[in-house]
Image: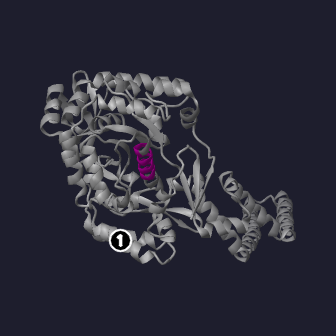
Amino acid sequence: MEIVTQNVHKNAVMQAFEQDEQFNKTFYDYKLSENSYPKRVSELKKRSFQRTKLVKTIRSFMEPFGISEAAGVHLNELENDGVVVIGGQQAGLLTGPLYSVHKAITVILLAEQQRKVLDIPVIPVFWVAGEDHDLEEINHVFTEQDGRPVKQQYPERYVLKTMASDTPYDADTMSSYIRLVFRDYEETAYTKNLLKEVLYAVEQEKTFTGFFVRLMNNLFQQHGLLFIDSADKSLRELEAEYFKLFIQESKALAEKIVSKEQLFEEQGYGTPIQATADAAHLFYVHDTGRVLLTRKEELFVNESAGVQFTTDELLAVAEQTPWLLSNNVATRPLMQDMVFPVLAFVGGPGEIAYWSLLKEAFNHLEMKMPIVVPRISMTLITPETKHAMNKSELSWDDVMSGEVIVRREQFLDENRDSQLDMLLQETEESIQEQYNKITDHISDEDLTNLAEKNRAYHLRQVKYLHDKAEDALLRKYAAVLRNYSQIEGDLYPERNLQDRTYTPYPYLNVYGPTLVDDLLQESLPMNGEHLVVYL
């Protein structure tokens, strides 16, 4: 395994986050520096957390998936005086895109690093957004076919907006779907066992969230990564008082988030959540699914679902049935910080953008925003893809700049029969010229129409011959062209980074089941640069 750092294009928010001191002062409470960590620990010591209840909740949630010895130690530390590094993601199929795994890797490495520096227990936690109801975002994976990412969608359809943690799948349908996905992977020494492990997880679980957590827990069990589902009923009960606070402070929180987003937009960074002053920033789990609440005069409503609460009624929901409430993108970070003693939050570019809007919301609730750390960005290069790059004399920079497509076209141009192309062009021009003379000469409308049809027929025949010549060229140099397609399709699919497209399973299939453990042994740098890993 060889690891090199490379620069990739970053959006304006990430550039400002990494380089602009004033941007950080405006939108965050802590700079991303070593000096911030002891300051954050001091702040956390002044706050109280329901540690015993929290650990009981996590333990109960994780027991069906298996609690490793390392995770058991971390639970004990969390119950006492441990702090956490936390990150999270929706419950995608086959763990979802690689960035879910990269985020977990970052959480673990940062926790290990700060444990040594601060000399206190720092525990890695993965917050699964099981409350999310947008199943269209998680019901598919991409596989590579002929150098292109192909969307493989899970076939069951869901009408209601149910949370991922409440959405069951049919085990037989899911097993057939997983086998279909694996057919696109090359057969290796690891394929059989890898498929067996995934199918076992399908059988053991019933929901999208359970399937996700079982796979992730297997990948990270040696490293003591703790998991919690944001939709877990016991967690909701623990959060009851915090939901009541969100309800009571709803108007103030909405105003502060709107104001911050306006400033964010004025500085040229867009509107990540398009916040509105009447937003309640809470969902209610209704018979029709999970519905977003807004404030209308003195009420909390969702008019399309016919839902309406007074403040007292919604406070009673929070008190008596808190599992019927859930957070949106704005209140989830706040809730996370109330539940956990969060030293640092690990997020991707999109998360860091919307976290930029929350500083005043945190401060209004008498908290500081935790240290925000970008997740590791990484591309895995298999031996086969590396061989194709060497053979095609293409570097990583070439791939990122779009040079693969240019080189492919140059190669085809150099090997086309230019004489034949010229003759076909001349033939087409000659046909056009002769038929122009014919149609100019003809005065009968029917004959003119017939001549035009005749012209079109002959031009189609010329095009047919041209297309057949192109097909012959592609067949002749199929092996060379396959190299270009593989490089583009694997490393920069549809002009996206690999970790936004593919799951880890094609790479586990090539490298073996120790891929995640071996990556963590490498002590990957967390300096904001993109990592290219040659497997």
Q: Provide the residue span drawn in magenta.
A: 103-115
Task: From the top left corner, tell me how far across and down residue 404 is, in percent.
Answer: 69, 59
Relative to the observer, which residue lies in front, 109 or 159?
109
| Residue drawn where x is 59% and y is 65% of the image | 147
Q: Is residue 111 magenta?
A: yes
Relative to the observer, which residue lies in front, 102 or 45?
45
Left or right for 289, reference 225: left
Task: From the top left corner, tell me how far across and down residue 316 is, in percent.
Answer: 13, 32
Residue at which label 1 appears? 197
Q: Is residue 328 visible?
A: no
| Outermost front residue | 119
In the image, residue 3 sits, relative to residue 85, either above or below, namely: below
Q: Is residue 67 magenta?
A: no
In the image, residue 401 sits, relative to residue 281, either above or below, namely: below
On the image, which quarter does residue 415 sit in? Answer: bottom right
Label 1: element kind: helix
Task: From the top left corner, tell me how far across and down residue 175 is, in percent.
Answer: 33, 71
Left or right for 433, reference 65: right
User: For the image shown, how many numbered marks are present on the structure?
Assistant: 1
Q: Amino acid at mark 1?
A: Glu
